Image (cartoon, coloured by chain):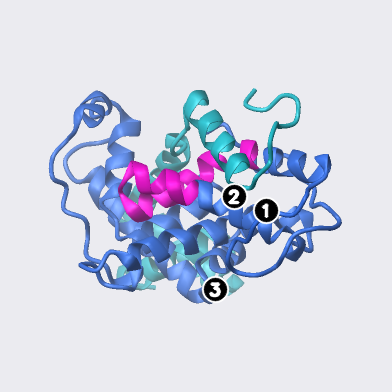
Amino acid sequence: MTASRHQAVHAPATGGSATDAPSPPVASDRGDVRWLEELFRANSSGVYTIARRVLHNDADSEDVTQASFIRAFVARSSLRDADRARPWLLRIAYREAVAVLRRRRDLPTDPAVLPLRHDTGPGPEDCLLAADVAGRVRRAVDALPPALAAAVILRDLQGLPMTEVAEVLGTGLSAAKMRVHRARTLLKVALHADDRVA
Amino acid sequence: MRCDDLEPLLTDFLEGDLPADVETEALEHVAGCRACDLYLAEYVETIELVAEWGGEALPTEVSQRMLAAVLNDLGINGSAPGTGS
């Protein structure tokens, strides 16, 4: 992962709307644009990873990633603490991804109760990855319900404190801990069922 | 502490959020229970494997294309020096 959670991003002092829906942009100074670019470089892979685990679809995940940064830029004045840009952005991304999920009419609306994803078989990329540990971990995470996958990625991959995991997921601390624990338990079974990884 | 008591405590155990007396009980149980010791080792290994996987690393060309699309959608023409580097 190329993004560094410690990379400094600064919130611009002015400009932008705090409304929910992106609106036509106002004229921005170079500081605003630079802030957006730094935010994108530091977090685009992390945002995409969250979207991909929720949506299981490359194109939709790219769309959600782009929409998340657009929404973040439009709402940038609502970011009061520059040190919290990462969880603030990830919360936007998670909500965007869940919104897309909810628009898929054939799926339940609560990602916490979605059934485990049944793998339809490896694609070309999966075949290349299947032989290594990263591929197995990725496939195991992909098989988790979206809300559990997001929780374990936020805590164990992106290293957010449990309080920020709860903030991103929009849950209480206990619920966030439970999701992380359930995800870890399912992953443990998947990764250790037949043989040892590593 | 019994084996069944330990499992739901693992997250708080690893976060350091257990009360001291419960944490001591958990440590003593793991020290004396081969099954729970193995379970905890696999649980921790699972956490490490997820961290080592690292998630999706967007290829540079994809990242550049996405950033360009974001800037374009925002009506921002021309990016700051170093975009996509």
Q: Is residue A193 visible?
A: yes
Which chain is home to disc 2? A
Give the chain ID for the cyan colour.
B
The image shows residue B56 at horizontal and vertical percentages of 44, 37
Vertical side of A13 occupied by B76: above or below: above
Q: Residues within 10 Å of mark 1 (few under 14, many from 20)?
A: many
Same chain under badges 1 and 2? The reply is: yes
The image shows residue B60 at horizontal and vertical percentages of 52, 25
Left or right of A124 in this view: A54: right
The image shows residue A16 at horizontal and vertical percentages of 75, 59
Q: Which residue is mark 3?
A: A173
Q: CA distance from mark 3 to mark 1?
A: 28 Å
Q: Which residue is mark 2?
A: A69
Vertical side of B60 occupied by A55: above or below: below
> Label 2 amino acid?
Phe
Same chain under badges 3 and 2? The reply is: yes
Residue A55 colored in magenta in the image: yes
Q: Which residue is mark 1?
A: A73
Q: Nearer the viewer, residue A9 or B30?
A: A9
